[in-house]
Amino acid sequence: MKTQVAIIGGGPSGLLLGQLLHRRGIDTVVLERKTKAHVLSRIRAGVLERGLAALMREAGVAERMDREAIRHDGALIAYGEDSFRLDFTQRAGHSVLVYGQTEITRDLYDAREAAGAPLEFEVEDVEIHGADTDAPSVRYSVNGQPRQIDCDFVAGCDGFHGVSRKTIPDHLRREYEKVYPFGWLGILSETPPVHDELIYASTDRGFALCSMRNPNLSRYYIQCSLYDNPEDWTDKAFWEELKLRLPRRFADSLVTGPSIEKSIAPLRSFVTEPMRWGRLFLCGDAAHIVPPTGAKGLNTAASDVHYLYHGLRDFYENNSTEGIDRYSEKALRRVWKAERFSWWFSALMHRFPGQNMFDTKMQIAELDFLRSNAAAQSAMAENYVGLPY
Ligand code: FAS
Ligand code: PHB
């Protein structure tokens, strides 16, 4: 098989890139390791920056998002019984959309299937060959049958555990990592959200986040030990702990119910450089990971897609390599700012094992400063709603 851009990974990065390129008549093939049902069963991000929303509209797949997404103009930052509302619109001039990553992925699958664009599931043994030549190829198998795609470019959109990043020779790759000494235990419940905006809460017992997917589907997280397993937590224990981490007025009004999904996500900051090797381009989680505190994971994948899409479009439509030649530099400049914000917000809101009273006083003083200072709130809001591409 021959195509122009072989895309490894059928998550949001690969699907969004494929859809954008398809609309410009650029041929792609998307290869996904899992089944469609498995990909859609993952409960992940929930907040869309304006840039991702705009990309979905540019890709022609935003009709349901624009109909069903909930616009949020702010979020509550709570610490003990103190709290303040971070007004995104007042401080940064933009809002965010609450619309689950699952829905983004579903909309993109629907569009690709409607277009009849090549999309293969349950691929195995994927290998990238000749990335440092002008004739790269991707070899893989389906049901034990070997296949090969000859292409102009390979987009490595295969997430943190994919094959693309490791295809770049070790001596050419630099990796930066910070692993956090805790995780997030998340549940999904068919209950009305406790508040009409997100609540980020910091207490001596640890961090909690109250989010949502729609008026009758709530998403809650509590910071948990790295040694916890979801099955260690009964629903009752989860709800009791969440209430202990919320301001009293929300603990008293929280509507609880059975969890329909329960999982633990580890927290890590990770960046690999460069994000390009020859005709292989890394995109999204294949190149970088952030702790979900700042809701930057999916949104930073989107900015990678933006830069790569425009670079590939310029190559095919204007015979220019400027965009692809500067892809890694441009993507990484924004990636590192998202990493910084995610690291900063995680350090501010979580309790670290072994932190002393001085550390806690510093966290409280920073939250007090944020509460009282417009410039500090503007800086936080500008990062939260999404820095410009
Ligand atoms: P993805 O990992 O989503 O997609 C990569 C795809 O490639 C997967 O479907 C995988 O099956 C496939 N693949 C892997 N290896 C392959 C191979 N060899 N061949 C073919 N296909 C292969 N972000 C937030 O903003 N907020 C959150 O709350 C949040 N929670 C998260 C929870 C968890 C458990 C995880 C892992 C991530 C979370 N994230 C969150 C980040 C997440 O949303 C990612 O940023 C987002 O999925 C990035 O999308 P992709 O780059 O497409 O990577
Ligand atoms: C979510 O709704 O899953 C979510 C929202 C905001 C975050 C992290 C996760 O910062």
Image (cartoon, rainbow, N blue to C red):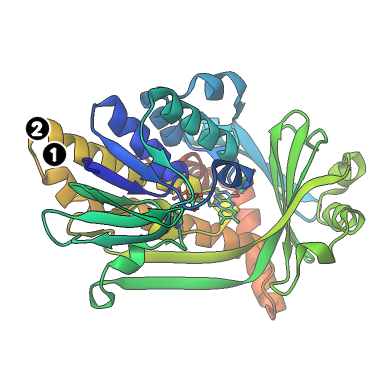
Kindly identify the amino acid type of the residue bearing the numbered disc 1.
Answer: Phe
Q: Could you tell whether 388 is left or right of 82 in the image?
A: left
User: Above or below — where is 153 with respect to 93?
Assistant: below
In what element is the residue under mark 2? helix
Residue 346 higher or lower than 111, as above or below: below
Question: Which residue is depicted at the point 52% across and 51% down?
Answer: 34
Q: In this view, does 129 lie above or below 262?
A: below
- Name the residue rendered at 82%, 47% in the picture: 259
The residue that disc 1 covers is 315
Residue 370 at x, y percent in the picture: 59, 51
Say whether residue 28 is left or right of residue 380. Answer: left
Q: Assign the N terminus to one quadrant of the image.
A: top left
Label 2 crowd (10 A; few <14 / some 14-19 / many >=20): few
Work out whether residue 350 can be spotted: yes
Q: Position of residue 329 (x, y in %)?
A: 23, 55
Is 199 above or below relative to 163?
above
Q: Mark 2 points at which residue?
A: 318
Q: Determine the image quadrant of residue 365.
A: bottom right
Count of numbered tags:
2
Image coords of residue 118 (percent x, y): 36, 36
Q: Residue at x 39, y 71 (%)?
A: 176
User: CB under 8 Å between callouts 1 and 2?
Assistant: yes
Pick the front one: 61 or 204: 61
Q: In which quarter of the image is the C terminus?
A: top left
Camera-nearest residue between 210 and 260:
260
Q: Which amino acid does label 2 sit on?
A: Asn
Q: In which quarter of the image is residue 164?
A: bottom left
